[in-house]
Image (tube, rainbow, N blue to C red):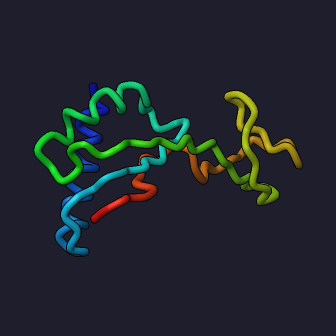
Amino acid sequence: MHELSLLMNVVEAVEELAARESFRKVHGLTLRVGVLAGVEVPALEFAFPVATAGTILEGAILTTQTVPVLCQCQDCRTDFEPLGTVFRCPRCHGLRAKLIRGQELEIGTLEVS
């Protein structure tokens, strides 16, 4: 389950932030999960209590936000959400799409004290 190791990295990042910003407890954490991130949200939710046990995140409420795929056509510079698995520009029908978002796993918000 690679979601556990991903969460361990999140815990480490939050603890480093806590040391810099002087907070002692996290009550809520929102993670933004891209559709193409290769992360199973149910596995992430299942592993969260294990990853946070004994840390400032223990007992925190985990919320996830799904981040849709967004591309930019490299021919006409149109931003678009692709339909299906073919990233074809709806404006010029070009196939040279650059992925702008949809692969991220990032901290969205923290509720701290």
Q: Is residue 53 left or right of residue 60?
A: left
Q: Nearer the viewer, residue 81 or 32?
A: 32
Work out whether residue 74 or residue 35 is closer to the camera in this orientation and state it.
35
Dividing the picture into quarters, in which one does residue 53 lie?
top left
Q: Residue at x 63, y 43 (%)?
A: 69
Locate residue 14, reporting x and y percent.
26, 58
Residue reaching furthest left? 54
Left or right of 30? Residue 18 is: left
In the rendered structure, the answer to whether residue 31 lies left or right of residue 70 reads left
- The residue shown at (28%, 56%) is 26
Image coordinates for residue 3, horizontal then vertical, percent: 31, 33
Instruction: Place residue 79 in its image quadrant.
Output: bottom right
Q: Quadrant of residue 75?
A: bottom right
Is residue 36 shown above or below 78?
A: above
Q: Residue at x 36, y 26 (%)?
A: 43
Q: Is residue 89 left or right of residue 19?
A: right
Quadrant that contains the N terminus: top left
Work out which residue is located at the far bottom of the displayed protein and give it.
Answer: 21
Numbered-mark total: 0
Question: In the rendering, at what x and y percent does residue 7 appear?
Answer: 27, 41
Q: Residue at x 73, y 43 (%)?
A: 81
Q: Position of residue 48 (x, y in %)?
A: 28, 36
